[in-house]
Image (cartoon, rainbow, N blue to C red):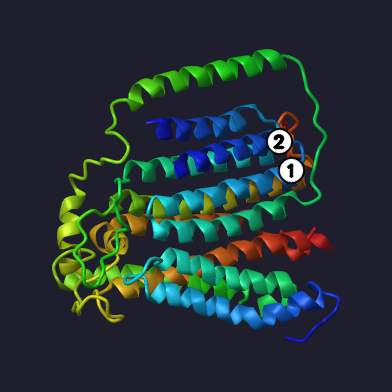
Amino acid sequence: MTLYFLCLILFCVGLYGVLRKRNLVKIIVGLGIMEYAMNLFFVLLGYRFHGRAPIEAKDQDILNMVDPLPQALVLTSIVIGLGVTALVISIALRIYEKYGTFDITKIKRLKG
Amino acid sequence: MELHILLIFMIFAAIVAIEVKDLLSSVIAVGAVGFALCLAFLVLKAPDLAITQLVVEILCLIILIRATINKDLPLVIEGRWVFNTVSTLGFIAVFLLFSWLALKELPGFGEPIMAVVKKYLQEGVSKTGAVNIVTAVILDFRAYDTLGEATVLFASVIGIMAILRRPGRKKRE
Amino acid sequence: MIDNPKTGMTLIVKTITRLTVGLIMLFGIYIILHGHVSPGGGFAGGVIVALSFVHLMLAFGKDTAIARISKNMASNLESIGAMMFLFIALLGFLGGSFFLNVFAKGSPFDLFSAGTIPLSNIAIGIKVGVGLFAIFLALVVLERSK
């Protein structure tokens, strides 16, 4: 129970970074921390005490495997997180090229 | 017990990553959070996830460092800073209070309900022939989700190529 | 790969890269092919193959890596990987429904078992690996053009 709560505290640290920071790269770092916290929360839901990894062995009959369904969903989510981070970084690079700064309070003009 | 230590280390590293002024140091701190997450996946008996998280973390660090070299900026504190910080922290405290009340309804840590997975575990090897149950789930029982993930990756690659295109050569002369 | 002292990194880095970049790609292909017997699978193996190309580009400069895989070839290879995955999915119609596993399933723990699962792993490995290298190529070309 305390493990779930610590995981949500990690999510809130990332959320604070997205809401209150003025530098674009700090906002992207906060987004990455939120993704890590949610992946960990999913895998924590499927753990079983004294369980074993979900791979069959050759001569034993394993009865106490951990839950493989959250692991399958999180595997997809990790690679999607990488794609989203790369896309957001490329938008930030274009913004720096056009305005000369990463500060979000100065990127308010709409002229080209 | 090891999970508590790893999670507290991750929270400290995340606070360092958000608060420090130098951009390169904060990117390295995010790398430390990702590496501790890989160790947590190993403790939770998920070897596929540990391998994938480690190599994805390395690639993410290379891309982030590429964006922050020589691009610092000085920090200036403007007005109404106290009010903004206090209201954000108040909102986060209310969120954590309600989540504490909601987390009590989940089954306890270590005793999952496993209603759907029993069937996958019993006839996974005989129906698909694969020994790795996670691979059998993502490529045979739930292959639609893998198709959706391939589409998302494809869309992000196309998006990056479209954003970072140089203007045509005719304009430079 | 001739050592041009003006581009890329120092001589020590170039020598170590020459020795190890083939082993990294071989390890990535091993993880892709044995996805149904041991942990790993298409995604992890594809990212490792992409990392071997990125290693080559970081150590030798942009021109050597572009001579191996140019931007057009990377884009075509990624589309081929995605279409191969869709083709394997449509093959399931021979058996009755979308994504059905129609090939023969051999005995467990063999390399050639589990029907269409190794073929799907190879398709996803190609797609993820080449796609991530194309992302890195786009980022590097932007830097040189400023």
Report which residue position mark 1 lands on: B23
Residue at position x 30%, y 50% in the image: A50
Nearer to the camera, A36 or B112: B112
Disc 2 is placed on an element classified as: loop
Residue position marked by numbered label 2 in the rendering: A23
Q: Is residue C71 visible?
A: no
Determine whether B40 is above or below A103 in the image.
below
Compared across the picture, whether C143 is left or right of C66 comes to right
Which kind of residue does numbered mark 2 sit on? Asn
Report the side of C108 relative to A15 (left or right): left
Q: Chain of mark 1?
A: B
Between C40 and C119, the one lying in front of the other is: C40
Identified by mark 1, the residue type is: Leu
- The quarter of the picture where residue C39 lies is bottom left
Can residue C91 be seen here? The reply is yes
Residue A43 point in image, percent of width and height: 38, 46
